[in-house]
Image (cartoon, rainbow, N blue to C red):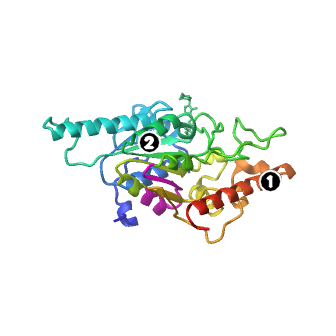
């Protein structure tokens, strides 16, 4: 039975306030929504990135659960190693060797990795792909803010076409990033893993429901969450939930899941909005509204969004 809003709101906070993430940052919202989805004990791993540097400034921590920081490329390998150690202890315990004190014999532990798009789409992809293929039981959540934010807003392979970053700067030479973003969610689905999904922080029920499903699965699971970054997106901090909803309504970031190979939309906008409604509030796309070159770029981006949406509808058997 999925938890209702009241039950979710009564779930103890596993990532507390007092961290140093920016006002309006989507990352703590996503982390909390995910961790609310289970009452089981959770072990978390985060590779380097905004979440790590801002929640664990020595000697303080905002985490109320066991949490490990590892290198940029290793989030999946590390959480998979912890899960393998847990399973090995359980297997020995079944043959009579006592469990270490720190493992509760009656608990059903869950394992989760949180990593940015730089640590997932780019540098951590090999460890994620490997841990998935080995079939470890873990949930991997990509906090996808579409750039390397912690080091000063550099482009990643998740940055959308047209997006201004410090390494795809909009100016007289180029109007922002020149390439489309990698479809990582589809890449993960191609691993034939038990559960893959896309979500946003602006629809709490969508995200918590997906996390609940993922935590219940004995195998690798992956949720790619579009996670607004007011600083890098040049966005008013209070717009974080709203802009993520606009991403879903314009089909720039559709909400869906792939469960045992079955693709399914979890949200279908009543009316598909033009991408401008998503782009305009964000300063990282401001240059696209200045001249003819920008209009051409927007046209290309709309065509891409339409192409990807139709591809998804087809995969979901909706056409
Ligand atoms: C191997 C390696 N390369 C580069 C860095 C420097 N570095 C630390 S955090 C970071 C950016 C993180 O970006 P992302 O994963 O998208 O997370 P975000 O900060 O946006 O949440 C980089 C490049 C590093 N720590 N290790």
Residue 252: percent from the left, percent from the top? 65, 56
Judge whether residue 238 can be spotted in this image.
yes
* In this rendering, position of residue 221 left or right of residue 107: right
Residue 51: percent from the left, percent from the top? 49, 40
Judge whether residue 23 can be spotted in this image.
no
Q: Secondary structure at mark 1?
A: helix
Q: Is residue 29 above or below residue 173?
A: below
Q: Which residue is mark 1?
A: 289
Residue 89: percent from the left, percent from the top? 23, 36
187 within the magenta span: no
Residue for point 19% across, 36% down = 92
State which image quarter holds ligand 1: top right
Identify which residue, 142 or 89, lies in the foreground: 89
State the extent of the magenta-drawn residues as a range. Answer: 193-210
Q: Quadrant of residue 33?
A: bottom left
Q: Residues within 10 Å of mark 1 (few under 14, many from 20)?
A: some
* In this rendering, position of residue 92 left or right of residue 197: left
Identify which residue, 141 or 92, lies in the foreground: 92
204 within the magenta span: yes
Give whichever of discs 1 and 2 has the lower sequence position: 2
Would you say the residues marked 1 and 2 are in contact, meaning their CB atoms lie under 8 Å apart?
Answer: no
Residue 96: percent from the left, percent from the top? 12, 37
Residue for point 59% across, 59% down = 254
Q: Is residue 81 above or below residue 310?
A: above
CA separation in Å, label 1 and label 2: 41 Å
* In this rendering, position of residue 315 left or right of residue 84: right
Image quarter hosting the N terminus: bottom left
Q: Total marks drawn?
A: 2
Residue for point 53% across, 59% down = 256
Q: Quadrant of residue 178?
A: top right
Q: Which residue is mark 2?
A: 132
């Amino acid at each position: 039975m999925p938890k209702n809003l009241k039950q979710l709101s009564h779930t103890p906070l596993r990532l507390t306030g007092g961290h140093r993430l920016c006002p309006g940052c989507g990352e703590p919202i996503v982390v909390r929504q995910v961790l609310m989805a289970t009452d089981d004990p959770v072990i978390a791993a985060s590779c380097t990135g905004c979440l790590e540097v801002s929640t664990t400034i020595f000697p303080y921590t905002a985490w109320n659960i066991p949490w490990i920081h590892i290198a940029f490329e290793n989030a999946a390998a590390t959480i998979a190693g912890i899960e393998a150690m847990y399973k090995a202890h359980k297997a020995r315990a079944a043959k009579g060797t006592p469990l270490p004190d720190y493992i509760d014999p009656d608990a059903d532990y869950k394992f989760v990795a949180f990593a940015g798009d730089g640590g997932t789409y780019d540098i951590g992809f090999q460890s994620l792909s490997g841990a998935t293929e080995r079939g470890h039981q873990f949930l991997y959540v990509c906090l996808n803010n579409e750039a390397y934010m912690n080091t000063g807003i550099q482009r990643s392979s998740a940055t959308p076409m047209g997006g201004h970053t410090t390494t795809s700067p909009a100016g007289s030479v180029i109007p922002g990033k020149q390439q489309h973003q990698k479809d990582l969610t589809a890449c993960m689905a191609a691993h034939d893993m038990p559960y893959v999904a896309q979500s946003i922080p602006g629809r709490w029920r969508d995200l918590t429901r997906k996390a609940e499903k993922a935590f219940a699965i004995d195998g690798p699971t992956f949720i790619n969450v579009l996670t607004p970054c007011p600083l890098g997106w040049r966005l008013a901090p209070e717009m974080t939930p709203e802009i993520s909803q606009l991403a879903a309504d314009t089909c720039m970031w559709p909400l869906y899941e792939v469960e045992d190979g079955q693709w399914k939309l979890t949200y279908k906008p009543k009316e598909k909005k033009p991408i401008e409604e998503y782009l305009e509030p964000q300063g990282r796309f401001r240059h696209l509204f200045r001249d003819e070159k920008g209009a051409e770029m927007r046209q290309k981006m709309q065509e891409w969004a339409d192409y990807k949406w139709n591809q998804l509808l087809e995969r979901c058997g909706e056409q």
